[in-house]
């Protein structure tokens, strides 16, 4: 697998593990396109920005962005999930080699970590007139860089 996909999977499984104590929360890899169940946390990789890492060399560093959408039943639930994520994402996220297999059937080896550079929490207003079922939404944006050590 390409390293960018391994990073994406590592963020997804890390966030899934953040909510392991609450099995009623659906954690999805990507925007939930089929019927939305409440509560849901959706993890979506977005931008990859590059920069020159070494002068006189073609080596480029990459800064990646993930959007973590929270769909909740009420304001308290939305705020609790968002605060939990903000707290957990302040730590480095371990990156695993999923070419060796996926949990829980196997434990892949660790190949580095994602170091968070920026975290942002944004409340998104949901208009009751535009939805069949009222829900509350927020967005956590994680920007980080891969460290292979």
Image (cartoon, grey):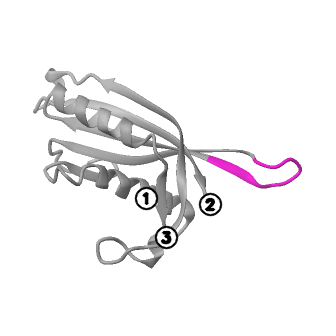
Q: Tell which tag, 2 or 1, sits nearer the viewer.
A: 2
Q: Nearer the viewer, residue 135 or 120?
A: 120
Label at residue 97:
3
Residue nearer the viewer, 86 or 35: 86
Q: Position of residue 95 (x, y in %)?
A: 49, 60
Residue at the image point whose x is 85% and y is 54% from the top = 57
How many neighbours does mark 3 have within 10 angstroms: few (below 14), some (14-19), or many (20 or more)? some
In the picture as drawn, the residue positioned furthest to the left comes out as 133
Image: magenta residue range:
53-62
Query: Dot 2 corresponds to which residue?
Result: 149
Q: Which residue is mark 1?
A: 10
Give the CA distance from mark 3 to mark 2. Answer: 14 Å
Quadrant of the image for the C terminus? bottom right
Magenta-colored segment: predominant secondary structure: loop
* Cα separation between marks 3 and 1: 9 Å
Residue sticking out furthest to the right = 56
Examine the image and state in which quarter residue 63 appears: top right
- Residue for point 47% across, 75% down: 99
Q: Is residue 78 left or right of residue 85?
A: left
Disc 2 to disc 1, C-alpha distance: 15 Å
The residue depicted at 18 percent of the width and 25 percent of the height is: 75
């Amino acid at each position: 697998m390409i390293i960018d996909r391994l990073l994406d999977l590592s963020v997804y499984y890390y966030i899934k593990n953040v909510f392991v104590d609450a099995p009623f929360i659906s954690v999805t890899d990507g925007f939930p396109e089929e019927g939305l169940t409440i509560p849901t946390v959706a993890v979506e990789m977005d931008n990859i920005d590059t920069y020159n890492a070494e002068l006189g060399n073609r080596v480029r560093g990459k800064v990646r962005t993930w959007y973590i959408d929270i769909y909740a039943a009420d304001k308290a639930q939305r705020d609790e999930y968002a605060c939990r994520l903000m707290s957990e994402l302040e730590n480095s996220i371990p990156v695993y080699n999923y070419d060796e297999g996926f949990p829980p059937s196997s434990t892949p080896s660790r190949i580095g970590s994602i170091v968070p550079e920026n975290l942002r929490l944004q409340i998104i207003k949901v208009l009751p007139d535009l939805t069949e079922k009222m829900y509350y939404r927020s967005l956590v944006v994680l920007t980080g860089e891969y460290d292979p050590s």
